[in-house]
Image (cartoon, rainbow, N blue to C red):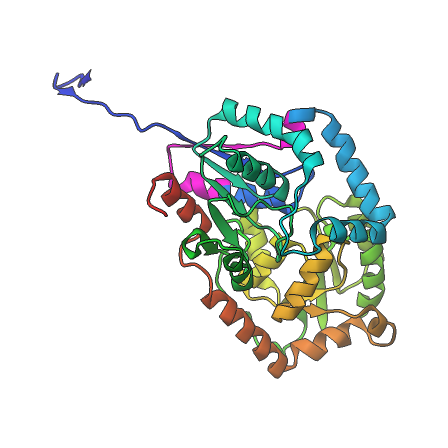
Amino acid sequence: MFKHEETGVLYMQTYEAKKTVLFLPFLRISSGHHQVADSLIYGLKNRLNTVHCEKIDILTYGYGKTEALISKAYIKWITAFPKLYSAVYRSSVYRDLKKNKRFRLYESLFLRYMRKLIAEMQPDLIVCTHALPSYMLSRLKVNGEIKVPVINVYTDYFIHQFWGIQQIDYHFVPTAGIKDYLLNKGIHEKRIFVTGIPIHEDISKHFIQKRDQDASPLSIMICGGSLGVGAIDKLAKKMDGSSNIKFYVLCGKNRKLFHKLQNLQAGNIFPLDYVECRKKMNDLYERMDAIITKPGGVTISECLFKRKPIFIYHALPGQEEINLQQLTNLGFVFKLKDRQLQSTSLENQLLAILQDQGRLKAFQDQLSKYHDGLTESDPSQIMSEILAGRTV
């Protein structure tokens, strides 16, 4: 009860308890797992004043500074021994997908810390954007140790064996094909939402026809920071001198790449600094006719929602190789062929597609089917309904 200072009338004051949502990516290095978690947190807080969100890496939580060493070793492994990493990745989590595989070593390393974290946080909802915490939570649910609802948010265009599936309450999947995969696993349809890989709300989900694709010059953005200097070096040699295309290279935090491209002093190559503001990133997308990138989940998802033609030049071993295979099968991307670039300029290879109305129509038709199959509610709205107890 409280008394109004002017009227003296007594009022009953009610408080709505804050709900705690725990987001679980893995490792602290910048990745799609973190970007998706951050986007969902942003969207959820915009909808609910009474929500408290925490994002925690279970490796750092359990083992402290060891995480930094493991992250560095992981990056060096991919860089120095890509074929070995790819082989190990596929054999460990992407073979015999119909089988339910146990990962007892990881259980011994992380289950006790997951128990401790849940006991400390007492979350009302848990959101996994990485397979490892999902697997651990699934094991705890099998043992009847937790009842808090858990959401898997898949950040690639496939599901591998490390993801916990059977005991997880809700699944946010990237495509209708992944939904079918889960249905075959026995997951109830009402617990699967085809959201696409979630993107930030400041990246608008609509298509603006910039202009006639036959007009020149075209504007193409290259997500260069994540591609790395080596891959961009090869592309840069094919970009210089193009009169029909302006290349905007998003260098991220890669200052070496930024200065390298700047020193080329090419009239059609424009290096761009790190763009942190998502609204500015949205404006960049709107100005582009196409995107050249690697098959990372978040960037691809942004391009799909913007309905921009996507060209793939380079894929990291493991996850991105499989993403590329899936995206190619779906007709969502165009693969730039390295061998063909030896005899054909980058400009000619791009224009061969961008000025081919038949191929562009087939691409847009595939995207239309994709968008028609998406759940109407966005991921943050679905999470709000789960917290309110309005979703099965």
In the rendered image, is residue 294 in sight? no
Q: Residue at x 66, y 44 (%)?
A: 31
Percent across and percent down for residue 144 are 49, 33
Task: Report the side of 76 relative to 277 (left or right).
Answer: right
Percent across and percent down for residue 388 are 34, 40
Magenta segment includes 326: no
The relative height of residue 212 versus residue 288 in the rendered view (above or below) is below
The relative height of residue 155 versus residue 184 in the rendered view (above or below) is above
The range drawn in magenta is: 41-61
Task: Report the side of 79 relative to 29 (left or right).
Answer: right
Task: Report the side of 248 relative to 205 (left or right).
Answer: right
Percent across and percent down for residue 136 are 59, 36
Q: Residue 307 versus residue 145: which sits nearer the camera?
A: 145
Q: Residue at x 50, y 50 (%)?
A: 171
Q: Residue at x 66, y 42 (%)?
A: 102
Q: Residue 347 versus residue 332: which sits nearer the camera?
A: 332
Percent across and percent down for residue 244 are 72, 74
In the rendered image, is residue 81 in sight? yes
Q: Residue 224 versus residue 60: which sits nearer the camera?
A: 60
Considering the image in quadrants, where does the N terminus appear?
top left
